[in-house]
Image (cartoon, grey):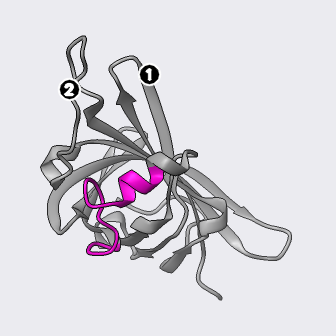
Amino acid sequence: MTLPANVTTGVWTLDNSHSEIGFTVRHAGISKVRGQFTEAEATLELGGSLADSKVAASIQTASFDSGDANRDGHVKGEDFFDVEKFPEITFVSRHVKANGDSFDLVGDLTIKGVSKEVTIETEFNGVAVDPFGNTRAGVSGETTISRKDFGLTWNAVLEAGGVLVSDKVVINLELAFIAPAA
């Protein structure tokens, strides 16, 4: 499969300041908590076709931010990410395949030293040239993981039944990449 129109080959880099790597997790069975990682690096290496393309990303676990300092401290600690011992979450693609109007990005996600294959359903949002002459491409993506699969097992049983933090975590990506210099 060929690349979308106006997309050039080469190594595109993540524009972290115009991207969001977020998550949603159910809390106490009644509400959803959202948060994001504010520091990440990624490259999108585009070959002549999607089959020749690769993605590699690293996320700084200490940049976790849910808007609540107490929760953030707990999640950065040993019960969850243990940022001192595991400073990065990484993703390395294996392949990309077309899925109707979208793409499935299949690769290895590593959290707390545990790697699992995940499929990120992605949507190409187009290409634009900004006022500074940079060519940008936008990609949205989503996947759902089991946090237990990655050793994130801390929880608390609720008095009324159930647990405080659901196992299911939805990862949401809104990414902007900058094209290689001509």
Residue with the mark numbered 2: 157
Q: Which of marks 2 and 1 precedes in the sequence? A: 1
As for residue 7 lying within the magenta part, the answer is no
User: Residue drawn 45% across and 63% down?
Assistant: 3
Which residue of the protein is positioned furthest toward the right in this rendering?
A: 131
User: Residue drawn 45% across and 46% down?
Assistant: 71
Is residue 147 left or right of 101 when viewed as pictured?
A: left
Residue with the mark numbered 1: 31
User: Residue drawn 22% across and 65% down?
Assistant: 112
Q: Quadrant of the C terminus?
A: bottom right
x and y, in percent, of residue 19 in the image = 59, 59
x and y, in percent, of residue 118 in the image = 22, 52
> In this orientation, which residue lies closer to the viewer: 174 or 159?
159
> In this orientation, which residue lies closer to the viewer: 128 or 19?
19
- The amino acid beneath tag 1 is Ser
Mark 1 to mark 2 CA distance (whole Å): 16 Å
User: Residue drawn 28% across and 72% down?
Assistant: 86
Is residue 168 left or right of 9 when viewed as pictured?
A: left
Up the image or down, 64 lies above or below 157; here it is below
Which residue of the protein is positioned furthest toward the top in this rendering?
A: 160
Secondary element at image label 1: strand
- The amino acid beneath tag 2 is Val
Q: Main secondary structure of the magenta part?
A: loop
Q: What span is colored magenta in the figure?
A: 72-87
Q: Which mark is residue 134?
A: none
Secondary element at image label 2: loop
Up the image or down, 78 lies above or below 135; here it is above
> Around disc 1, counting alpha carbons within 10 Å, would you say few (fewer than 14), some (14 to 19), or many (20 or more)?
few
x and y, in percent, of residue 158 in the image = 25, 21
Q: Quadrant of the N terminus?
A: bottom left
